[in-house]
Image (cartoon, grey):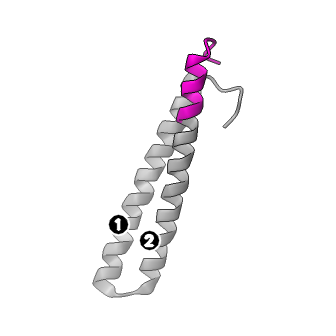
Amino acid sequence: MSDDKSTAGNMLDAAKAKVNEAADRAREAGHNVAHAVTGDTHHKAEALEDRAKAEVHNAQANAEYSEGKREATDGDGK
Protein backbone atom coordinates (compact mmCIF):
# COMPACT_ATOMS: atom_id res chain seq x y z
CA MET A 1 0.00 0.00 0.00
CA SER A 2 1.12 3.45 -0.75
CA ASP A 3 -0.19 6.68 0.69
CA ASP A 4 -0.15 8.34 -2.71
CA LYS A 5 -2.68 5.98 -4.37
CA SER A 6 -6.16 7.17 -5.16
CA THR A 7 -9.34 5.51 -3.95
CA ALA A 8 -9.71 3.81 -7.33
CA GLY A 9 -6.10 2.60 -7.23
CA ASN A 10 -6.58 1.04 -3.82
CA MET A 11 -9.85 -0.59 -4.85
CA LEU A 12 -8.24 -1.96 -8.01
CA ASP A 13 -5.37 -3.42 -5.98
CA ALA A 14 -7.90 -4.96 -3.57
CA ALA A 15 -9.72 -6.59 -6.49
CA LYS A 16 -6.46 -7.94 -7.91
CA ALA A 17 -5.56 -9.42 -4.53
CA LYS A 18 -8.98 -11.10 -4.34
CA VAL A 19 -8.46 -12.63 -7.80
CA ASN A 20 -5.07 -13.92 -6.67
CA GLU A 21 -6.65 -15.30 -3.50
CA ALA A 22 -9.27 -17.17 -5.53
CA ALA A 23 -6.57 -18.64 -7.78
CA ASP A 24 -4.57 -19.76 -4.75
CA ARG A 25 -7.64 -21.41 -3.22
CA ALA A 26 -8.40 -23.19 -6.52
CA ARG A 27 -4.84 -24.54 -6.65
CA GLU A 28 -5.14 -25.61 -3.02
CA ALA A 29 -8.30 -27.56 -3.84
CA GLY A 30 -6.59 -29.21 -6.81
CA HIS A 31 -3.66 -30.29 -4.67
CA ASN A 32 -6.02 -31.63 -2.00
CA VAL A 33 -7.80 -33.73 -4.64
CA ALA A 34 -4.48 -34.97 -6.00
CA HIS A 35 -3.39 -35.89 -2.47
CA ALA A 36 -6.66 -37.74 -1.85
CA VAL A 37 -6.29 -39.68 -5.10
CA THR A 38 -2.58 -40.46 -5.00
CA GLY A 39 -1.72 -40.22 -1.31
CA ASP A 40 1.41 -38.28 -2.30
CA THR A 41 2.35 -35.99 0.59
CA HIS A 42 3.98 -33.58 -1.86
CA HIS A 43 0.49 -32.55 -2.98
CA LYS A 44 -0.56 -31.93 0.62
CA ALA A 45 2.48 -29.71 1.17
CA GLU A 46 1.67 -27.73 -1.97
CA ALA A 47 -1.93 -27.35 -0.80
CA LEU A 48 -0.74 -25.91 2.51
CA GLU A 49 1.57 -23.52 0.67
CA ASP A 50 -1.27 -22.34 -1.56
CA ARG A 51 -3.52 -21.85 1.48
CA ALA A 52 -0.86 -19.65 3.08
CA LYS A 53 -0.55 -17.60 -0.11
CA ALA A 54 -4.34 -17.22 -0.21
CA GLU A 55 -4.37 -15.89 3.34
CA VAL A 56 -1.67 -13.36 2.46
CA HIS A 57 -3.65 -12.19 -0.56
CA ASN A 58 -6.80 -11.97 1.58
CA ALA A 59 -5.02 -9.78 4.12
CA GLN A 60 -3.62 -7.61 1.33
CA ALA A 61 -7.08 -7.21 -0.22
CA ASN A 62 -8.58 -6.20 3.11
CA ALA A 63 -5.83 -3.67 3.74
CA GLU A 64 -6.13 -2.14 0.27
CA TYR A 65 -9.92 -1.98 0.55
CA SER A 66 -9.71 -0.31 3.96
CA GLU A 67 -7.21 2.22 2.63
CA GLY A 68 -9.40 2.92 -0.39
CA LYS A 69 -12.44 3.35 1.82
CA ARG A 70 -10.50 5.74 4.05
CA GLU A 71 -9.37 7.71 1.01
CA ALA A 72 -12.96 7.90 -0.24
CA THR A 73 -14.26 9.27 3.06
CA ASP A 74 -11.50 11.79 3.79
CA GLY A 75 -12.85 14.05 1.10
CA ASP A 76 -10.03 14.29 -1.42
CA GLY A 77 -10.07 10.78 -2.94
CA LYS A 78 -6.29 10.79 -3.24
Kindly report the secondary structure that dominates the magenta region of the rendered protein.
helix
* Residue occupying the point 52% across, 41% down: 62
Query: Eyeballing the image, is 29 above or below 8?
Result: below
Q: Are marks 1 and 2 in contact (CB under 8 Å)?
A: yes
Residue 61 x/y as whole percent: 52, 42
> Of helix, strand and loop, which one carries label 2?
helix
Residue picked out by circle 2: 47
Residue 72 is left or right of residue 51, and the answer is: right
| Crowd rating for badge 2 (residues with CA inside 10 Å; few <14, some 14–19, many 20+) | many
Please report whichever mark, 1 or 2, sits nearer to the chain's N-terminal start. 1
Query: How dense is the environment of label 1, judged by Cα within 10 Å: few (below 14), some, or many (20 and up)?
Result: some
Q: Which image quadrant for residue 23?
A: bottom left
Residue 63 image label: none
| Magenta segment boundaries in residue numbering | 65-78
According to the image, label 1 marks what residue?
29
Q: Residue at x 44, y 45 (%)?
A: 19
In depth, the one of 39 and 71 nearer the eye is 71
Q: Would you say 15 lies left or right of 76 here?
A: left
Quarter of the picture holding the N terminus? top right
| Quarter holding residue 64 | top right
Q: Which amino acid does label 1 sit on?
A: Ala
Q: Horizontal and vertical percent for residue 32? A: 35, 73
State the image coordinates of residue 38 (x, y, percent, origin top left).
32, 86
* Label 1, label 2: how far apart the Cα atoms are: 7 Å
User: As drawn, which residue projects farthest toward the top?
Assistant: 75
The type of residue carrying mark 2 is Ala
Q: Give the residue furthest to the left.
A: 37
Horizontal side of 74 relative to 3 (left or right) equals left
Q: In this view, does 31 lie above or below 75?
A: below
Would residue 66 be counted in the magenta stretch? yes
